[in-house]
Image (tube, rainbow, N blue to C red):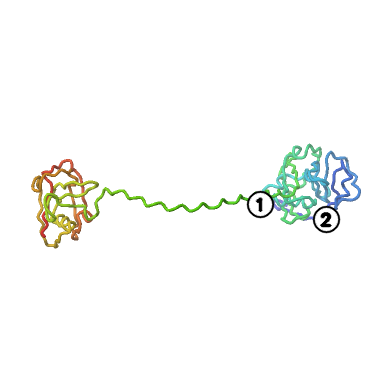
Amino acid sequence: MSGEMLWMRHRSLSPCAWSGSLKNPSTLPSLPWASSEPPTLPFLPLCICRCADVRLTYGSNDYPGSCAQGRLEVRVGGKWGTVCRTAFEPYRGTDLSVENTQAVCRSLGLPWQGAEWVAGGREATQGSPNTSLPINIVVAFCDADSTDFPNDCKVPIGLDKRCTHDEDVKVICKPPYPPPPPLPPSPPSPPPSPPMPPSPPSPSPPSPFPPADQLVRFAGGNKQEGRLELFFPDKWGTMCYTSTFSNSVAKAVCRQMGREVFDDDQVDFGYSGSRYGEADLPVVATFTFCPLNKEAGSLTFDCEISSANVDRCTHDRDVWVRCPR
């Protein structure tokens, strides 16, 4: 049988024949599955719950009238023995610990929905002396509806998991945890506050920027000509004449001033510090570039303006413009 795993499935047996505490045998008749007389067994220090092939021993009576926990012992081949913790741990990727634990408790007619298991030999079973028992089961696979452990579970035989009694399993049968108490009702919401009257509109502070159509002007002349002054970037000032100021720039200035300018017009422009009076504003712009592929309709919005090297300019180079009409 090298490398071959054999499985055994026991036939279903009768339900629990007797359950109760040997310290208090008078409680046995109250159990629906208990016989009228306790069996003749050696005196046990605590209690035992037993079916045909499964029992819990050396546990404690947490639920009146039944031993709800103790060391798990099963009968295989007519011999009682313990169960190793490996039967309740994942085996080859399969974790059936919940199914196996609940199957044990269902087999004993005990509360099973909250069943748990622990391992630890003597510590798990309050000092059981039966360490001479064999270890009968090392792996078990029970279904979610198994009711006769281990008879209707798959139990591979011939496995050597090298278990010791320090790894004996203890099963604790108990009902599910009670649901949490319902939350107290929330206090009623306060009545809604009456609506606030609308606030009067706040007066808007005056903008430091002039309207868009008033960002350029002629000083010292009239609406057709004069020293060019512009609002850039955040204050009024003059423009320093450089080689970038061309006829296309001058026409963009006239159009922004509302003057009629044709595409083929030539606009007079130049620079002078006194032709239209002395300026009392700073120089704010030096270079300007208008598009070459179309006629600019506005200096401010259609052309690029720069203030680079403005500190090197003086009012002697203030730009003036004379529109054709």
Disc 1: which residue: 94
Discs 1, 2 touching: Cβ within 8 Å = no
Tell me the element at label 1: loop
Against 68, residue 265 (above or below) is below
Query: Residue 71's x, y, as percent?
Result: 78, 43
Residue 208 seen by the camera: yes
Front one among 31 and 324: 324
Disc 2: which residue: 13
Rendered image quadrant of residue 267: bottom left
For badge 2, the amino acid type reads Leu
Tell me the element at label 2: loop
State the mark number for residue 290: none
Near mark 2 (Cα within 10 A), the count class, few <14, some 14-19 or many ≥20, is: few
Query: Residue 163's x, y, as percent?
Result: 72, 42
Which of the two discs, 1 and 2, labels the residue nearer the N terminus? 2
Residue 80 seen by the camera: no
The reply, left or right, for residue 206 in relation to residue 262 is right
Near mark 1 (Cα within 10 A), the count class, few <14, some 14-19 or many ≥20, is: few
For badge 1, the amino acid type reads Thr
Query: Residue 21's x, y, as percent?
Result: 85, 43
Q: State the quadrant of the C terminus.
A: bottom left
Q: Residue at x 83, y 40 (%)?
A: 46
Front one among 174 and 82: 174
What whole-number distance in Å separates the C-alpha atoms at marks 1 and 2?
A: 27 Å
**In this figure, what is the number of numbered marks?**
2
The reply, left or right, for residue 278 in relation to residue 189 is left
Against 238, residue 291 (above or below) is below
Query: Residue 107's x, y, as percent?
Result: 79, 52
The residue lying furthest to the left in this view is 275
The reply, left or right, for residue 304 in relation to residue 174 is left
The reply, left or right, for residue 225 in relation to residue 183 is left
